[in-house]
Each structure stands twice: as structure tokens, then as C-alpha cells.
Image (cartoon, grey):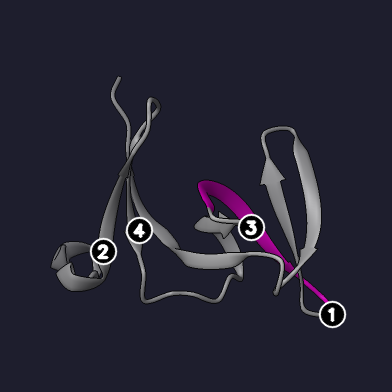
Amino acid sequence: MNKYGLNDSSVIEIETNEALYLVNQDIKSAVSGKYLVDIDGHLSINHVQRLPGKKLAVAFGDTTMEVTEEDIKIVGRVAVVLKTI
């Protein structure tokens, strides 16, 4: 984990059909990138982009939705993605 600048106690692994994600829970403020987000109690990994006015653009596949910071909770930033080939 040190190789990626990650602290073992703050990293969680998320495994999906597509990949294994290492999520850094120390980063809870979205700027731009892939994040583990909690939307109404449901977790998903999405691309998030900060917008002016304390808003965020959250990508859901081919669709992007604009939300306020209060609408979602950032659980952490995706630090490493491992995919099988």
C-alpha cells in the first residue's frame, strides 16, 4: 500500500464484475475522478466532477446528473483499479 501512498487502515477494497477497486477513505471531498459514493444508502463507484456553487456532476454510465454536495456522501476516492485481461 505504501507504494501508492495509502494507509492500510483507511483503504477498503470494492470488488465488482469489472474490477477490484482500492478506495482511500481519507479523501472525502470530491474534486475530479472516480469516487465511492453513497446515494440514499446505496454505494456505487462513479466519476465525480466538482462544479461551481458547491455542486457536483456525477456520471452514471452515459448520463451525468448534477447534484448538491448535500445530496450524496463521498465515502472515498478510488486510488487503484485492478482489472483482469
The reply, left or right, for residue 83 in relation to residue 30 is left
* C-alpha span from label 2 to label 4: 5 Å
56 drawn magenta = no
Query: Seen in the image, is 11 located left or right of residue 38?
Result: left
Q: Please tell me which residue is depicted at 77% across the width and 79% down the height of the picture.
A: 54
Q: Mark 1 vs mark 3: which is more N-terminal? A: 3
Instruction: Give the main secondary structure, helix, strand or loop, of the magenta stretch.
Output: strand
Q: Amino acid at mark 3?
A: Val
Q: Amino acid at mark 4?
A: Val
Vertically, is 6 above or below 46?
A: below
Residue 72 drawn above or below residue 64: below
Q: How many neighbours does mark 4 have within 10 angstroms: few (below 14), some (14-19), or many (20 or more)?
A: many
Q: Are marks 2 and 3 in contact (CB under 8 Å)?
A: no
x, y (%) of residue 24? 34, 66
- Helix, strand or loop for disc 4: strand
Residue tagged 4? 23
Q: Which residue is tagged 3?
A: 48
Residue found at x 52% / y 46%: 44
- For the magenta stretch, what is the residue range? 42-52
Q: Is disc 2 in contact with disc 4, using a CB cutoff of under 8 Å? A: yes
- Residue that mark 1 sits on: 53
* Residue labelled with disc 2: 11
